[in-house]
Amino acid sequence: MKKRVVSTLGRLDQLQEKRDVETITHSLSKFSENILMVLTGKSDIKSDSLIIGPALIFKRLWEETSLESMAIARITGLIANRWL
């Protein structure tokens, strides 16, 4: 299969300013029936996700230790000190 560059996108912030991401998405949708159906609202978007990496570690630490209660106590203490 021969491959070729269809387009170079450039910097994300510049694309978002000009709304080029939406334009490119709509232009490319003609090559995929599934994408076209999703964009027109005629198809449900189904996806599964997994929590991995640092988010999983922090979640587990948060649940298995008393980090939540310590954070609440710290915030409450800071608020109380401002009123004194």
Image (spheres, rainbow, N blue to C red):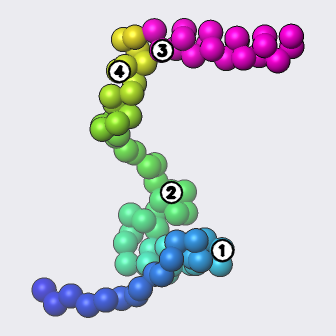
- Give the percent coordinates (x, y) of residue 41: 54, 57
The quarter of the rendered structure image containing the N terminus is bottom left
The quarter of the rendered structure image containing the C terminus is top right
Closer to the chain start, of discs 2 and 3, is: 2
Q: Amino acid at mark 3?
A: Leu
- Give the percent coordinates (x, y) of residue 31: 37, 78
Instruction: Name the residue carrying label 2.
Output: 42
Q: Secondary structure at mark 1?
A: helix
Q: Which residues are magenta?
A: 66-84
Q: Nearer the viewer, mark 4 or mark 1?
A: 4
Instruction: Name the residue carrying label 1.
Output: 17
Closer to the chain start, of discs 4 and 1, is: 1
Most frequent secondary structure within the magenta stretch:
helix
- Circle 1 crowding by C-alpha within 10 Å: few under 14, some 14–19, many from 20: few
Residue 13 image-quadrant placement: bottom right
Closer to the chain start, of discs 1 and 3, is: 1
Give the vertical position of 51 relative to 34 (above or below): above
Drawn side of residue 32 relative to residue 19, left or right: left
Q: Amino acid at mark 1?
A: Glu
Give the vertical position of 40 relative to 55 (above or below): below
Q: Nearer the viewer, mark 2 or mark 3?
A: 3
Q: Nearer the viewer, mark 2 or mark 4?
A: 4
Closer to the chain start, of discs 3 and 4, is: 4
Q: Amino acid at mark 4?
A: Arg
